[in-house]
Image: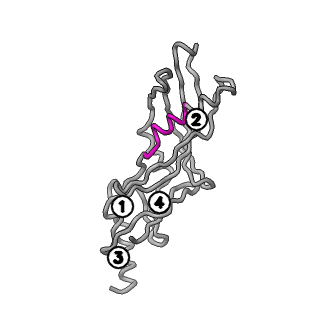
Amino acid sequence: MTPTKKLASAALLALALDMAPGAHAAYNLWTNEYSLSKQELEAAIAPQFPRKLRYMEIFDVTLSNPRIGMDPERNRLTTVVDAQIANQLLLARPVNAALTMSSGFKYDAATRSLRLDAPKVDNVDSKDLPPQYAQQLTALGNAAADQLLREYAVYTFKPEQLEMNGKRFEPGKITVEKDAVKVEIKEQ
């Protein structure tokens, strides 16, 4: 097969995969990357919310309204969620806060999935608590981030997305950009 025919068949395969039902990551033939848009990542994370959690068997925490952001400088995805913390014995009324969590990405070869990695709370904003309680609220937020986002699969590659012309490919470098996450694909 001539190089032109190989390129044309690869382009057609990439186009077919991109248009296949349920295939959300777009493949760029020229850069050998799959791209997941900010909107696709939001849709992948949305089913986790609203979520009710119990912390230290004392606090009831409700997390809702996730808002996704991209942090290219740190190569991380940010998720801002509204948090409501309640404890009938210690708090006269529920405490409201906004938690800004961030996560890296990693590829899990066993499941062919792109997963969130090392989630943590970057910021806690609450007008209901004095600043001296920020450390406790951050600890509670880190427990919630770990429980909700650690190893959470945001995308699973189909086997045919990682095979082309009899060759097998694996995701490599994962890069967070302003509006998308790019996943490099390299030959095994």
- At mark 1, the secondary structure is helix
How far is disc 2 from disc 4 in space, using C-alphas? 27 Å
Query: Which quadrant of the rendered structure holds the C terminus?
Result: bottom left
Q: Report which quarter residue 79 is drawn in.
A: top right
In the image, taking residue 187 as reference, residue 96 lies left or right, namely right
Q: Is residue 24 left or right of residue 137?
A: left
> Which quadrant would residue 187 be assigned to in this image?
bottom left
Label 3 is placed on what type of residue? Ser
Q: Residue at x 34, y 65 (%)?
A: 16
- The residue indicated by pointer 2 is 99
Check the image and tell me how it is coloured: one colour
With respect to residue 64, does 115 lie above or below?
below
Of labels 3 and 1, the one closer to you: 3
Query: Is mark 4 in CB contact (under 8 Å) with mark 3?
Result: no
User: Which residue is the site of mark 1?
Assistant: 19
The residues bearing labels 1 and 4 have C-alpha atoms spaced at a distance of 14 Å
Q: Mark 2 against mark 1, which lies toward the viewer?
A: 2
Q: Can you identify the residue that label 4 sits on? A: 35
- Outermost residue on the front side: it is 56
Q: Amino acid at mark 2?
A: Leu
Q: Residues within 10 Å of mark 3 (few under 14, many from 20)?
A: some
Quarter where residue 179 is shown: bottom right
Q: Which residue is mark 3?
A: 9
Q: Is the residue under label 4 in contact with that under label 1 (CB below 8 Å)? A: no
Q: Earlier in the sequence, mark 2 or mark 1?
A: 1
Among numbered discs 2 and 4, the one appearing first in the sequence: 4
- Label 4 secondary element: strand
Proximity of marks 3 and 2: CB atoms separated by less than 8 Å: no
The amino acid marked with disc number 1 is Met
